[in-house]
Image (cartoon, coloured by chain):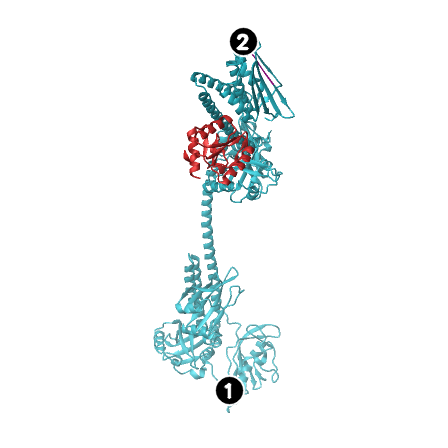
Amino acid sequence: MCSAEALPKKLESKISGLDSPDFRAVLDALPVAVYATDQAGIITYFNQAAADLAGRQPELGKDRWCVSWELRRSDGSILPPDECPLTQTLKQGRAVRGSEIVAVRPDGTMVPILPYPTPIFDKSGMMTGAINVLVDISERKGSEVESRRQAELDSRYLAAIVESSDDAIVSKDLNGIITSWNKGAEHLFGYTANEVVGKPITILMPPGHEDEEPHILDRIRNGVRIDHYETKRQRKDGSLVDISLTVSPVRNATGRIIGASKIARNITEQKRAEELMQARLREQASLYRLTEKLHRAKGIEEVYDAALDAIRAALNCSRASILLFDQSDTMRFVAWSGLSEHYRHAVDGHSPWTSDARDPDPIFVKDVAEADFSDDLKATITSEGIAALGFIPLIAGGRLIGKFMAYYDKPHVFSETEICLGLTIARQLGFSIQRIRAERARQLAEEQLRRNEANERARAAELQAIMEAVPTPIWITRTADCRVIEGNRSAYELLHLPSGSNLSFSAPADERPSGFQTFSAGRMLSADELPVQRAARGEEVENFEEEIRFADGKSRHLLGNATPMRNALGEVTGAVAAFIDITERKQTEEALRESERRLKMALDAGRMGAWEWNLQTGRVIWSPGLEVLHHLDPGTFEETLSDFKRDIHPADLPAVEQAIEKALATREDYHVAYRMRLLDGTIRWMEAFGRFSPPESAAGERLVGICMDITERKEAEAQRDLLVAELSHRVKNTLATVNSIARQSFSTNPDARDAQRSFDARIRALAQAHTRLAEARWSGVSLQSIFSDELAPYRNEDVDNISLDGPPTTLPPKHALTLGMAAHELATNAAKHGALSVKAGRVSVDWAVDPVENRLSIRWNETGGPPVSPPSHNGFGRLLLERVLASDLGGDVRLEFASHGLNCTIDVPYLRGAE
Amino acid sequence: MTESEGCRVFVVEDEFLVALQIEDDLVAAGYVVLGPFTTLQGSITASREQKFEVATLDLNLRGEFVYPLVDELLERGVPVLLLTGYTAADLPERFRALPRLAKPFDGPELIRQVESLLAAR
C-alpha cells in the first residue's frame, strides 16, 4: 500500500466536490469503506462498503466523526469518537496515518481497521471537511499485503519509539548535517529539532573533542558501527554531558550508505554512580586492606601503621595520628604520619573527651580558622599547616581508649561516607588494639602460667626432697579412708619398716604394719584414734603426743600435728601428719625434773636457795627456799637487786657489791660470803655462788646461782679458829712452862744427873696431866685422878700406904695442870725424903669443897716417914707449891714440916661447875 | 746496862712459871719488875697506880684478853711488848703492828725487845 512518505500531504479541494455524480458512483462502488464529513465531523457521505464495515446504516447529517457503532484501540480500550483519527485530522488540519484501531459492530463483531483521514480544503485554503478511508485489515495475515502493512507498522512503531525514547536519537547525513532530532535529543542537548536540523552535528562537540566527528564519519562511511562510545558533549547551555554514543550507518533501498543514526544516552548519572562506585570500591579496598593488615598484625605498631594508611585512604586526608589514654588517663600520641615533633609536643594530652566519656561523638572541624579553639591551639594547628581535622573516638570494650585524628591541608567538608568510614576504621582499630592488648595479656598470662607451672613442678620436687630430707617423720594418705598411708624416709626409719610399705592400721589385715603399736596417755590407740585417720575425717589434730612402742620393748615419743587435705570443693581427700621425735626431750625433761627434785632436796637439806638475775631485765628471781632463808613469806621477794641488798649487813655490802662488779667485769664466776641482817635482827652468814648463763641464751644473759646459809659453818670455823688459837696459846704457854721448869730444875740442882731425872719426871707429870685433860677433852679432870696418877708409882697395896679421900671434884684445866705439878712435887718429895721413902710411911690426901665460900681445900698428910726438917733452900717443889699455886690459882698454900712428916694445905677458889 | 738502871717494867703474865722466868731475865738485866700481874682487873688497877717505863703483857689471862689494858697503855704512851703464843692473825687488827714476842722466847731476845722499845721511846 502507500508508505507514509508516499501519502499526499493534502487533498486538492478540486476533489472535495463529492456531489459529482460520476465521482459519487465510483465512490459508491468502491470495495473500500469511504466516508466524508464536514468540518464539524458530521457525516455527509458514506458508501456501501462503509456501511458493511460498520455493520449498520449510518445516518447522514447526524452521525459524527465515525460511521462505526463503536471504536476501540488496538489494545482493546474504548476509543471515544471525538478522539478518533479523523477527529484529529479535523482538529489539526492534517492527514493522520497509521493509527490502527478496531471497529465494533452492533452485532459485537470487531474489525481491525486502518483509517486514512485526510483533510479537505477549499480553494481559499479553508478546511471544509475530511474524507476518511477505512481499510479492513482483518484479512491481511499471511499475505504480502499484510507483510507490507506490518513493515509499515514496524516503521511507525519505530518512529513512535524514536519519538518517545529518552535517549537522544539523531540522524545525520554523511556530511555531518543533522537530519532528524527526537524529543530525547531535545531533552538531552537543550536544542529543539527546529534549531538543529540542517546544522552540522559538530555544534555539540565540546572543546577538545573536535576531531571525534571526522573519525566517526570515516567509520560510518566504511559501514562500521560504533557501539557505546563514551564521550562528552556540550549542551546548548554550555554544560558538558557524559554520553554513551552508538552510531549506525543508514542505507537507502539500494544499500548505499546515506547517513548515520546516532543514539546518545546521558551517562552523567551513570558516570557519577560509577565514580561513586569506584570511590566505594577504593574505600572498601582500603577497609579490606585494613582488615587484612589488622588481622595479620603481630604487634601494635603494625596495627597503627595499617590504621594510619586506612585513615588517609578512606578519609582522603594527608596526615593522621593515633592517640591513646595512658595509665594516668592522659591522651598520648602512639602513632602518626606527617606530624612534626613540635606539634605533637604542643598538643600532647589535648583531648575533647575524658577517659570516662560514654559513647562520644566524633568531632569534625571543617575549617580550623572558624573553629572554636583557643588562640594558642589554633595557632599551633595552623602553623602545622592543618586546615581541617577530624577527631574520631576509639572505643574498646565499651570504653573510650583514645582517638584517631585526620588532618587536612585545606578546609574539608566531611561527607557522610567519610564519617561512616572513619567510624568503621575506629571500630576496627579499637577492636584490634583491644585484640593486641588482650593477646599480649594472654601471652603474659601464658608465660606466667608456664613459669608458674615450672615453678610448681620445681616446688613439688622441692617439697618431695624436703619431705625426704627432713629428720621429722611424716605420714601422708591420699584417700579419706586411709587405706594406704605412706611415710617419708624419717618415718620408715623411725618405725624400722622398709621404705614404701603401708603404714596404715586402717589397711586390710594382711597389709597393716607390724612390730609396733601406738599409745597415747598410756593407752593403746585404735586405728580410728590415730592422728592421720582423725585428720582424714576432717579434724585438725594439733600437739598430739603419742608413744610408739616396739616389740623389743623400746619406745619413741612423738609430738606433732595432723591436718586434712582438701580438694577445691573442700572435700577431704586425704591427710598429712608430721611429728617430731621428743624421746630425748622427754628423757631430758624427766632428768631435769629429777635433777630439780634433787636440787631442791639439796637446797632444802643444805639450807640453800637458788637465784637468777636477768641482766637484761634486771629481774631477780629467788627460789622459795631462798625466801625461807631470808625469813620471807613465799612470793614476797620483790625481785629486784636492791631488795636483795637490803638484807645484807651494811659492813659486808661493799664486799658483795665489789664481788658483783668483778663478776660482771670479768664474766667469771661470782663467789662471795657475807652476813645478812634480817628484819628480826638475826645475823646469818651467807655464801653465794653464781655463774653466767651463755650469752647467746634466748632468755638474755643471766647470772644464776645458789645461796647457802653458812652460819653454822662460820660459827664452827670461828670455833675452830678459836681452838687453834687457844691450842697455839696453850702449847706455847706449856712450852714456856717447860722452858721455865727446865731452867728451875737445872739451876737449882747442882747434881746434873739428879736435875735431869727431876726434869724428866716433872715433864712426865705435866704430860700426865695433859693426858688426863685430853681424855676429858679438856673439860676437866677429877681431883682424885690427879693425885692417884702422881702417887701410883709409890703405891703399895700390901701396906695400903696411900689414901685418897674426898668428894668427886672436877678440876678445870688450869687447876688440873698446876695441881698436877704440885702433886708431882709432893709425891716426888715424899718418895725421896718423906713418908714414901720408908716402908712404914703413909700419905693421905683428903679434900673438901666449901660451897658457901666456893673454895676447895686439899690436905696432904705424910706420916710414918723419917723426921723432916724445912729444906735448906727453896727448891723447885717449894717454889711451885708456895708461889705458883698461889699465883696461878689465887690460892693459899701452907707447908708444915712436922716431925711425923710433911703437911700441906692447899686452899684455892673453886666454883663448882665453873668450867 | 746503864740504860736499864732503875727502869721499871710492868709485867703481866698469868702463867707463874713463865712470869718467874721473865722476872729473872729482867732483874738479871738490871730492870725493876712490877708484878707479875696475873689477872686483867688486877693489872689494870696496878698500872694506874704505878709508874713504869715499859710493859710486857701476856694476852690471855685465864681466858680474859688483855686488850683493854693495851689500849689504856698505848693511850698513855707506854711502850708495850706483847708476849703471846697467838699469831698475828689471831689478834685484833689494831694490835697486829705492836711489838710481839712469841712464846716460848729466850731471855736475850726479851731484853733486846724491851731495850729497843725504851730506845724508841
Q: In the rendered structure, does residue A843 fall within the stretch colored magenta?
A: yes
| Residue hosting label 2 | A839
Q: Position of residue A282 (x, y in %)?
A: 42, 66
Q: Secondary structure at mark 2?
A: loop
Q: Secondary structure at mark 1?
A: helix
Outermost residue on the bottom side: it is: A124
Q: In the rendered structure, does residue A407 fall within the stretch colored magenta?
A: no
Identify residue type, mark 2. Answer: Lys
Q: Is residue A706 visible?
A: no
Q: Nearer the viewer, mark 1 or mark 2?
A: 2
Task: Tell which subunit mark 1 falls on.
Answer: A
- Tell me the residue at 52%/38% (across/down): B72
Give me the disc on residue A503: none
Instruction: Choose between A618 and A108: the one closer to the eye.
Output: A618
Q: Position of residue A82 (x, y in %)?
A: 58, 81
Looking at the image, residue A428 lies above or below residue A588: below
Q: Residues within 10 Å of mark 2 (few under 14, many from 20)?
A: few
Q: Position of residue A739 (x, y in %)?
A: 46, 24
Identify residue type, mark 1. Answer: Ile
Q: Position of residue A554 (x, y in %)?
A: 53, 26
Tell which chain the image draws in red: B
User: Which residues make up the magenta segment?
Assistant: A840-846
Instruction: Choose between A241 and A194: the one closer to the eye.
Output: A241
Tell which chain the image draws in cyan: A
Q: Is residue A111 visible?
A: yes
| Residue hosting label 1 | A15
